[in-house]
Image (cartoon, rainbow, N blue to C red):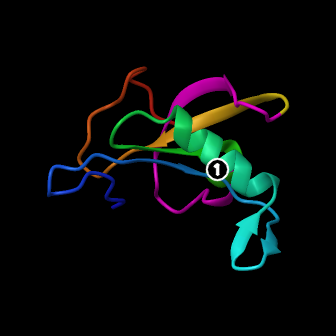
Amino acid sequence: MIAVASNDGLSIRAGLHTGECERDGNKLAGIAVHVGARIAAVAQSDELLVSRTVKDLVAGSGISFQDRGEHALKDVPGAWQLYAVCLEGSSPGREGQQT
């Protein structure tokens, strides 16, 4: 189970992408970091969105996803297919479809 909602009344949103990162002192940088931040910006409250890259990498893990469609990410070329991680015991999301 992936917990996104907090018990103390706080709501979060998160975005996840994977790729090559660069180290800039104590900070991580690079396009993969930028894409992850832009995916988080698209997420709704209490939602974890992932890129198709992440979805494909965890195939066979038992994690299920809901398709959130293609999105243009600010300052990132191309259209990005995004997926919401289905929480254990949650009902289908906006589109009502699981993949």
The span picked out in magenta is 56-76
The relative height of residue 35 versus residue 44 in the rendered view (above or below) is below
Residue at 69% across, 72% down: 27
Query: Residue at point 62% right, 47% down?
Result: 37
21, above or below 56, in the image: below
Q: Is residue 65 left or right of residue 23?
A: left
Q: Quadrant of residue 80?
A: top right
Quadrant placement of the N terminus: bottom left
Residue drawn where x is 79% and y is 66% of the image: 21
Disc 1, SS? helix
Task: Name the residue nearer the viewer: 30 or 46.
Answer: 30
Quickly name the residue at label 1. Answer: 36
Closer to the camera in the image, 99 or 81: 81
Residue shown at 72% from the left, 49% from the top: 34
Examine the rendered structure and indicate whether residue 99 appears above or below residue 37.
Answer: above
Q: Count the labels in the image.
A: 1
Residue 88 location (% of width, % of height): 29, 52
* Magenta residue check for 84: no
Where residue 69 sits, quadrant-wise, is top right
**Disc 1 crowd, CA 10 A, few/some/many (<14, 14-19, 20+):** many
Q: Position of residue 85 (x, y in %)?
A: 45, 46
- Horizontally, is 68 left or right of 19 in the view? left
